[in-house]
Amino acid sequence: MVQTGNGNLEPGSYDTPVPSIAIFCVWFGPWPGWIDFTLESMKANHSIDWIIITGNAPPAKPCPNVRFQQVSLQSYLSFVTSRLGVEPTIDNNNNDVCKLKAALGHIHEEDINGYDFFGFSDLDIIFGDIRNFYTPALLSKYQMLTTHNDLVAGHFTMMRNTPQLRTAFMKIPNWRKLMQKPGASVNIEEWHLARVFGVLARQPAWHSWLYRLRNTYIRGALFEERYSTILTPMKWHDGRRDHPESWFWKDGHLSNDRHPNREYLYLHFMNWKSDRWLQYAGLTPPCAWSRLDKLIHIGKGEEANGFRISPAGFTAL
């Protein structure tokens, strides 16, 4: 695979003795309009490395802790097939490549050699201070950390870099057939992988307890709701059905207008950019950003000074 980028990634070469982390994102298609804002939030997490697999040339924005692996979708799928022993059915869209997330640690085993943890995430995200939440003490206690309490979050999940965790997806029944199933709604990385780690939906409590007792993967797995995704059916942590609409990022820290003194791990704004999941929250299209004439209201490069994310797009603080 061809590797391009503007940074030197040396796992473990940080100022403090903290576990090293590499996070994968897979993106095929044009860069989204907000890419510089997402990259700025990655850059602020300077002790965490990102590996972005894409068909695009890297954006001009310099990010020392982001590595871009530029490769065509066809070439990438050939590489994936050689690693999995099965050819996934992938259409040319970013929703469909999500079915690979559960297997990225195995597919890219060489890329994460030397890292303590690996993970997967998305690009429709603004990250807060990740180390503020995933401290060395927490990482020493858990082997898998995800940001929902009832499924493995496809938008941000981390696992310890061990053979057992890299191949956990192989414990999914019929995982090969799921990889070959057409469409983007297979949810291998979310619902199916959650079952491997002991989350059983709509099961009696005693059945779930017995399953967890016999399951070595659930030991050391942290399913904790981080309130990252807006406009979903769940109540917010304050008990309200409506979710905060104005978020602030500055100097690597993320908060919102409703809870200005509380920091958040990240903001996942998929329901402002897409209509796809609005119905599950009882909402009707169009999504907020589809109605905007202009999404970005900040000059290029000024995102480093901080910004606001809201239904109005990206604006200055």
Image: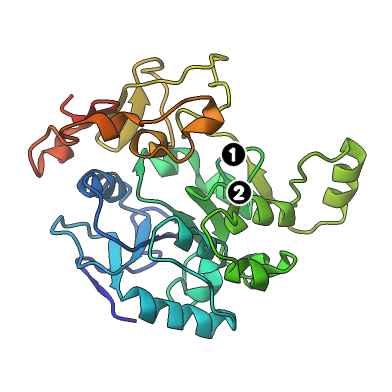
- Disc 2 residue crowd, few under 14, some 14–19, many 20+, Cα 10 Å: many
Closest to the observer, 272 or 44: 272
- The answer to whether 180 appears left or right of 249 in the picture is right
- The answer to whether 216 appears left or right of 178 in the picture is right
Could you give the CA–CA distance between mark 2 and mark 1, rounded to whole angstroms? 7 Å
Q: Residue furthest left?
A: 299
Quarter of the rendering containing residue 288: top left
- The answer to whether 58 appears left or right of 245 in the picture is left
- Counting from the top left corner in percent of width and height, residue 202 is at 80, 39
Residue at x 84%, y 41% (from the top left corner): 203
Res 19 seen here: no
Q: Secondary structure at mark 2?
A: loop
Closest to the observer, 181 or 150: 181
Closest to the observer, 203 or 228: 203
Q: Is residue 176 above or below residue 26?
A: below
Residue at x 39%, y 15% (from the top left corner): 258
Res 303 seen here: yes
Identify residue type, mark 1.
Answer: His
Q: Secondary structure at mark 1?
A: loop
Q: Is residue 60 above or below residue 53?
A: above
Q: How is the image coloured?
A: rainbow
Instruction: For the residues labelled 2 and 1, say whether their Cβ atoms are less than 8 Å apart.
Output: yes
Identify residue type, mark 2.
Answer: Val
Quarter of the rendering containing residue 166: bottom right
Q: Is residue 243 above or below residue 207?
A: above
- Disc 1 residue crowd, few under 14, some 14–19, many 20+, Cα 10 Å: many
Closest to the observer, 278 or 9: 278
- Where does label 1 land, which residue? 148
- Where does label 2 land, which residue? 152
- Counting from the top left corner in percent of width and height, residue 96 is at 47, 60
- Counting from the top left corner in percent of width and height, residue 25 is at 39, 59
